[in-house]
């Protein structure tokens, strides 16, 4: 019913109706603007989505059809195949009892990643300088590492098996792709096999740490690496060797007690320049060198996978301390020297 004034004209609607209309409009606006996903930080890593074809390669002519009677194979996600799979990293007890394994804590991105001032100290509050660096370390035992890097024209899922022509493996974070989240090529370390073999066993940069499986060698290029990085959590030091020769060494910031740097062996999988912080944060310094393994204290980091990295720092005066979330931070000039000298696949040993 319309309320009329004494003059017979309809009176203006009450403020309540106007407020209700404004509330509805605000809700619609929030729904339209609140669904966009924010860009992850560079130390975070999420399962790699398949990029558009326009990102991977320029348009090409349609591939010729195979002759009649021939067969072709196409990599497809495990969830779309009918071949049996083996879940890597599952607990036999959990399978038997139907119980889920406990999840590691999922912590929010620390404020220091967006507010570097939190870790900067006034000059009169700086800690005393670290003790002199000990004599250069002797080269640890090492052996050349054989590395596979996915070919540039191979863009898709990498099927991984428990043996040649065996059962397909499924990993906790999803399929293994021939490229990373940042569009770099997949790097794997050879455990068994040699050039010319149809199948090769590799260690993969996926969870669980140290995951391995068999892949077809035809999709990869081979190389041999003699560089190796030694990170000592107790001494809080980093050293790069080429064979027996020391290339660079420095003290480092390592993980704090709540998020310690894991003592693991792996390899270098990505080198990401960050000189102008166009890709990440000033906290990460001039270079980010991603390793093949992940934090053992965190289930995720900043909305992505908690991959361990060696990177620069905006607080070189605090090297020698334990204050990171598990990554290793070193002065920018040293991390740049390592980034330029250490090839992909460089062996990484973290010891206590």
Image (spheres, rainbow, N blue to C red):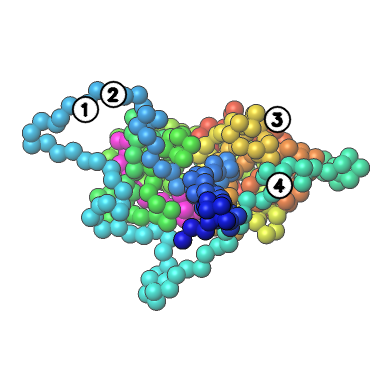
Task: Name the image quarter holding residue 256.
Answer: bottom right
The one of 51 and 143 positioned closer to us in this rendering? 51
Which residue is denoted by mark 4 in the rendering?
112
Q: Is residue 107 left or right of residue 249?
A: left
Helix, strand or loop at disc 2?
Answer: loop
Marks 2 and 4, the one that precedes in the sequence: 2
**Residue under numbered circle 1:** 63
- The span picked out in magenta is 206-220
- Farthest residue toward the left? 68
Q: Earlier in the sequence, mark 3 or mark 1?
A: 1
**Residue pointed to by mark 3:** 333
Q: Marks 1 and 2: in contact by CB < 8 Å?
A: yes
Find the distance from the CA under tag 4 to the CA under tag 1: 50 Å
Nearest the eye: 296 or 54: 54
Circle 2 residue? 60
Residue drawn where x is 72% and y is 43% of the image: 115
What's the distance in space between the residues labelled 2 and 4, CA to CA?
45 Å
286 relative to 76 in the view: left or right: right
Q: Secondary structure at mark 3?
A: helix
């Amino acid at each position: 019913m319309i309320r009329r004034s004494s003059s017979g004209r309809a009176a203006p609607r009450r403020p309540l109706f106007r407020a209700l209309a404004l509330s509805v409009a605000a809700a619609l606006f929030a729904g339209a603007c609140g669904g966009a996903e924010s860009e992850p930080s560079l130390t975070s890593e999420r399962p790699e989505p398949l990029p558009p074809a326009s990102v991977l390669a320029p348009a090409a002519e349609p591939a010729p059809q195979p002759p009649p009677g021939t067969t072709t194979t196409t990599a497809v996600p495990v969830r779309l195949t009918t071949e049996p799979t083996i879940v890597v990293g599952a607990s036999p007890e959990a399978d038997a009892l139907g119980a889920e394994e406990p999840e590691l804590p999922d912590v929010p991105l620390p404020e220091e990643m967006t507010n570097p001032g939190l870790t900067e100290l006034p000059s009169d509050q700086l800690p005393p300088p670290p003790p002199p660096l000990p004599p250069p370390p002797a080269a640890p035992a090492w052996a050349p590492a054989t590395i596979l890097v996915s070919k540039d024209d191979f863009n898709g899922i990498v099927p991984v098996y428990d043996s040649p022509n065996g059962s397909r493996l499924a990993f906790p974070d999803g399929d293994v792709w021939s490229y990373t989240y940042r569009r770099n090529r997949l790097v794997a370390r050879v455990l068994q096999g040699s050039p010319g073999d149809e199948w090769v066993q590799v260690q993969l940069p996926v969870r669980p740490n140290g995951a391995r499986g068999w892949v077809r060698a035809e999709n990869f290029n081979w190389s041999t690496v003699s560089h190796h990085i030694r990170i000592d959590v107790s001494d809080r030091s980093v050293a790069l060797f080429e064979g027996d020769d020391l290339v660079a060494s420095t003290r480092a910031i390592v993980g704090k007690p709540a998020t310690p740097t894991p003592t693991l062996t792996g390899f270098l999988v990505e080198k990401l320049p960050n000189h102008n912080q166009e890709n990440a944060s000033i906290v990460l310094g001039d270079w980010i060198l991603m390793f093949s393994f992940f934090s053992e204290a965190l289930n995720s980091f900043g909305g992505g996978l908690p991959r361990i990295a060696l990177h620069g720092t905006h607080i070189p005066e605090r090297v020698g301390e334990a204050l990171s979330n598990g990554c290793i931070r070193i002065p920018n000039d040293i991390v740049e020297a390592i980034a330029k000298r250490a090839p992909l696949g460089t062996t990484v040993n973290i010891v206590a």
